[in-house]
Structure formats: structure tokens, C-alpha cells
Image (spheres, grey):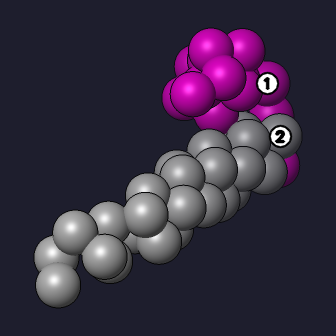
Amino acid sequence: MIPALWTMAYGERGNALTRGVARLAVRTTEFLRALSRCGHDTFTIL
């Protein structure tokens, strides 16, 4: 996780548009990390 991005997304400073874009970036980053981990676990499940 990127600490500066997290602070921008969930902090009290900044306008609503900036916080919304930062939250979208945080969620996208978390989704891509989960997706990359999912690809590595497929052969261990079989």
C-alpha cells in the first residue's frame, strides 16, 4: 500500500474529487494485488 495515497484517500484534507480518485486508486491497487496472488495459487489448489 502507498501511505501517501492512503492518507489522501481517507484523510480530511483535500476536496471530494481528489479523495474519490485516490480511493479509486487504492481499490484498484488492492484488486490488482489480489488478482496477481490468485494467479500464483491455482496450481497449489489442484
**Residues at marks 2 and 1 touching, judged by CB atoms closer than 8 Å:** yes
Residue stretch in magenta:
1-17
Residue ID at (32%, 77%): 42
Q: Is residue 31 visible?
A: no
Q: How far apart are marks 2 and 1 (CA)?
A: 6 Å
Residue ID at (64%, 33%): 9
* Quarter of image, res 16: top right
2 versus 31 height, above or below: above
* Quarter of image, res 1: top right
- Image coords of residue 29 (percent x, y): 63, 50
> Relative to 14, is 43 on the left or the right?
left
Residue bearing mark 2: 18
* Quarter of image, res 11: top right
Residue bearing mark 1: 14
- Image coords of residue 3 (percent x, y): 62, 15
- The amino acid sitting under disc 1 is Gly
Q: Is residue 44 magenta?
A: no
Q: Kindly state the secondary structure of the residue where label 2 is placed.
A: helix
Query: How many numbered markers are drawn?
Result: 2
Residue lying at the far left in this picture: please name it.
45
Task: Say which mark, if any, is on residue 42.
Answer: none
22 versus 33 height, above or below: above
Residue ID at (22%, 69%): 44
